[in-house]
Each structure stands twice: as C-alpha cells, then as structure tokens.
Amino acid sequence: MSPEEKFEDLVDEFTGRPGITPPGTSGGFGRTALRTNGRIFAMFVRGQLVLKLPGSRVDELVEGGHGVRFDANKGTPMKEWLALDTGSPQPWAALAEEALEFVGR
C-alpha cells in the first residue's frame, strides 16, 4: 500500500469523530492535516506522515530510526513534530492516536 493510500485510510478512520476536521478544509500550511478542535495532530507532507508528539516521544522514534524531526522548509527541525520514515514498521493509526491525545490535552 502506498503512503498516500495509508494516509487516506487514516483520514477515513479519524473522520467522523467529534472535533475532528479532515484535510482540505483550509489552504496553505496544514491543508493536508487532520485536526482536532482546529489544531493539527497529523498531516501528509512530501510523501510522509507527519505527527505532533511529545518531544521525548519524537526523540525515542528518531533514535529508533523510525523518522526524523519535521522541517517545514524553514531550516530548523521542529522538536515536537516527527516525519515518519515510509519504511518504518510503526503503525500509523496507533501513532495518530498518540498525536491526537497529545494535541487534545
């Protein structure tokens, strides 16, 4: 399954939950994002799933070789954003649940 198809499945899984807004409801940065109460928790950027997670969790996943800190083309990687490597065996839905919980706090 391609990363695009995996993200489409993720959107289908989360859309319909209370407070969740699917991609395509805004323009510019975050146009490919899943949001909870207006805040981005997961998005699809440059062919990768990007998630907002606690910095310590991002550290853990980066150190485990599952991705890199997301850089929004501003030259500085963001400490609470992970760009998941497409080859990572980490389950997208479980990571998105973690991101949703973190952003929803």
Image: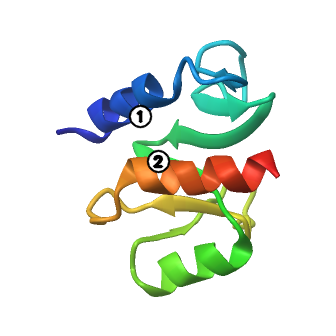
Q: 95 and 62: which one is in front? A: 95
Q: Residue at x 47, y 42 (%)?
A: 46
At mark 1, the secondary structure is helix
Alpha-carbon distance for marks 2 and 1? Answer: 10 Å
Say whether residue 73 is visible.
Answer: no
Q: Which residue is mark 2?
A: 49
Which label's residue is closer to the chain start, 2 or 1?
1
Image location (x, y in percent) of residue 100:
65, 46
Q: Is residue 29 above or below residue 16?
A: below
Q: Which mark is residue 10?
A: 1
Q: Quadrant of the N terminus?
A: top left
Q: Residue at x 54, y 49 (%)?
A: 97
Image location (x, y in percent) of residue 13:
42, 29
Apparent side of residue 72 relative to residue 37 in the rendered image (left or right): left
Apparent side of residue 18 relative to residue 47 in the rendered image (left or right): right
Q: Is residue 38 above or below residue 99?
A: above
Within 10 angstroms of label 2, few (less than 14), some, or many (20 or more) residues? many
